[in-house]
Image (cartoon, rainbow, N blue to C red):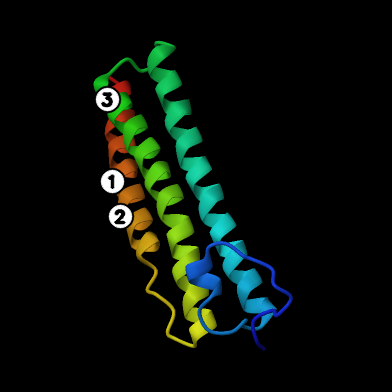
Amino acid sequence: MSAPSHGTRRWPRRVYEAGTDPDPRFSLANERTFLAWLRTAMALMAAGVGIEMLNTGGLLRTPLVTVLAVLLLLGGIVVSAVAFTRWAVTEHALRTGRSLPPPRLGAFLGYGLAVVGLVAVVLLLLSDR
């Protein structure tokens, strides 16, 4: 398939001016993945706000709760900031026939959530005392 010739301008240009249009199924799958990353980012941020509510509500008053909330919020911010770049790099690779980029966000989330889980375990153990 080739790029559309009817003069439409698509943004970002650096993505759409390269190569030719791939099979629409691949572009749509890339878009669904981008939206999944955004849902993940929103869930992380909502969890951060929710956990901080435990702190302000007096249920678990400790600086560790704030640390956990901040880690979740920062994780959500990073994921949302990187998601669009990931979409653009993947779309560019699809259009130019290059290899897809490695899934760096997956490692960030995997290790990041492991740290958040450890902090949550510490909080649970401290709350029983």
The disc at residue 105 is none
**Picture coordinates of residue 45 (x, y %)?**
46, 36
**Looking at this rendering, what residue extends furthest in the top direction?**
58
**Looking at this rendering, what residue extends furthest in the right direction?**
6
Amino acid of disc 2: Tyr
Question: Residue tagged by mark 1?
Answer: 115
**Picture coordinates of residue 87 (x, y %)?**
50, 64
15 vs 56, nearest the viewer: 15
Amino acid of disc 1: Val
Task: Please report the residue visible at 32 percent of the width from the left and 15 percent of the height from the top.
Answer: 61
User: Secondary structure beneath disc 1?
Assistant: helix
116 vs 91, nearest the viewer: 91
Mark 3 and mark 1: Cα distance apart in space: 17 Å
Question: Residue tagged by mark 3?
Answer: 126
User: Secondary structure beneath disc 2?
Assistant: helix
Disc 3 crowd, CA 10 A, few/some/many (<14, 14-19, 20+): few
Amino acid of disc 3: Leu
Quarter of the image for residue 9 reads bottom right
Task: Please report the residue visible at 27 percent of the width from the left and 25 percent of the height from the top.
Answer: 126
**Picture coordinates of residue 89 (x, y %)?**
44, 70
Mark 2 and mark 3: Cα distance apart in space: 23 Å
The disc at residue 111 is 2
Q: Is residue 62 left or right of residue 90?
A: left
Closer to the observer: label 2 or label 3?
Answer: 2
Task: Please report the residue visible at 74 percent of the width from the left and 75 percent of the height from the top.
Answer: 6
Q: Is residue 36 above or below residue 44?
A: below
The earlier-in-sequence mark between 3 and 1 is 1
The earlier-in-sequence mark between 2 and 3 is 2
